[in-house]
Amino acid sequence: MSPTVEILSDQAALIDRAHQLTVETIQAAIAARGRATLALSGGSTPKPLYSSMVGVDLPWEKIYIFWGDERYVPHDHEKSNARMAREAWLNQVPIPAENVFPMPTSADDPATDATKYEETLKNFFQSQSDEFPALDFVLQGMGDDGHTASLFPHTQALDVCDRLVTVGNHDGEPRISFTIPLINRGRKVVFLVAGESKQNALSQVFSEDADPHTYPSKFIQNGSDCHWLLDAAAGAGVPSQFK
Ligand code: 6PG
């Protein structure tokens, strides 16, 4: 199934559309399965989307929050993705604490914490040992280099296909990350990408011949429903046949 690409006029329109899609997906998941499971991304782009979710009338007790990746820092660190989402959104809505599953970063060993998070996912989804659970809404960002989650170009994490969670590496800095197969199992995978600096990587991700090891977002070919939400600046990089 080819991806859906929506190009919005500017960042404000992009966030409005992302907000609408997020709420719709949550509501549809709850209607269909009695709960909504989300994986959040970090970075700066999603922050206004998270803030826009404050004040929305949703059955928060039926919503479960995971993260698709995390920097290997304490949860109160300024670089923490969990801290960013809590401050922008989760601390300001009545979501039960037990519904929020930040990636652990306290074992002083990223591989140990990656395994712990894998166990958390397997227990929550009651998935069999070799099964990849399907989250309802998997939010992805994309870096200027085409990375997504903490799956960076030409790193080992790109080749981990038998695990749910692995250790990423960004310039020697360890990260915890969903693996490509887990992201691709998402019922809806939404890329939220803004800014001129993303143009080149986007043109590569949407090109036939670019190497996904160089532009890892290209590995995310979600079978069911991959949705790219771009602002005009970033979207200029997408070949016309996708627009
Ligand atoms: C992270 C993210 C990462 C991010 C991209 C884009 O931990 O930083 O999960 O994959 O989505 O780097 O970041 P921006 O939104 O800041 O451009």
Image (cartoon, rainbow, N blue to C red):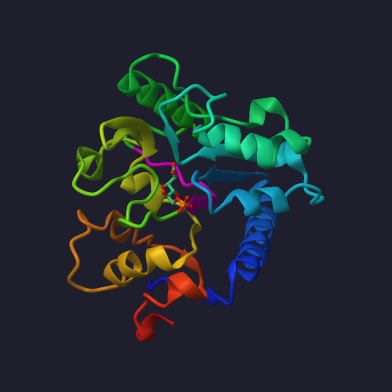
The one nearer the camera, 194 or 149, is 194
Q: Residue at x 41, y 78 (%)?
A: 236
Rendered location of residue 233, percent (x, y): 47, 73
Count of residue discs: 0
Rendered location of residue 105, percent (x, y): 44, 22
**Where the C terminus falls, by quadrant?**
bottom left
Q: Is residue 116 left or right of residue 111?
A: right
Residue 135 magenta-highlighted: yes
**Residues drawn in magenta:** 131-140
Q: Residue furthest top?
A: 107
Q: From where the camera sits, is residue 213 visible?
A: yes
The one nearer the camera, 9 or 70, is 9
Rendered location of residue 9, percent (x, y): 58, 77
Q: From where the camera sits, is residue 5 visible?
A: no
- Residue 19 drawn above or below residue 81: below
Which quadrant of the structure image shows residue 23?
Answer: bottom right
Q: Residue at x 65, y 35 (%)?
A: 86
Q: Main secondary structure of the magenta part?
A: loop
Rendered location of residue 100, percent (x, y): 62, 31
Q: Is residue 102 left or right of residue 128?
A: right
Q: Residue at x 18, y 47 (%)?
A: 154
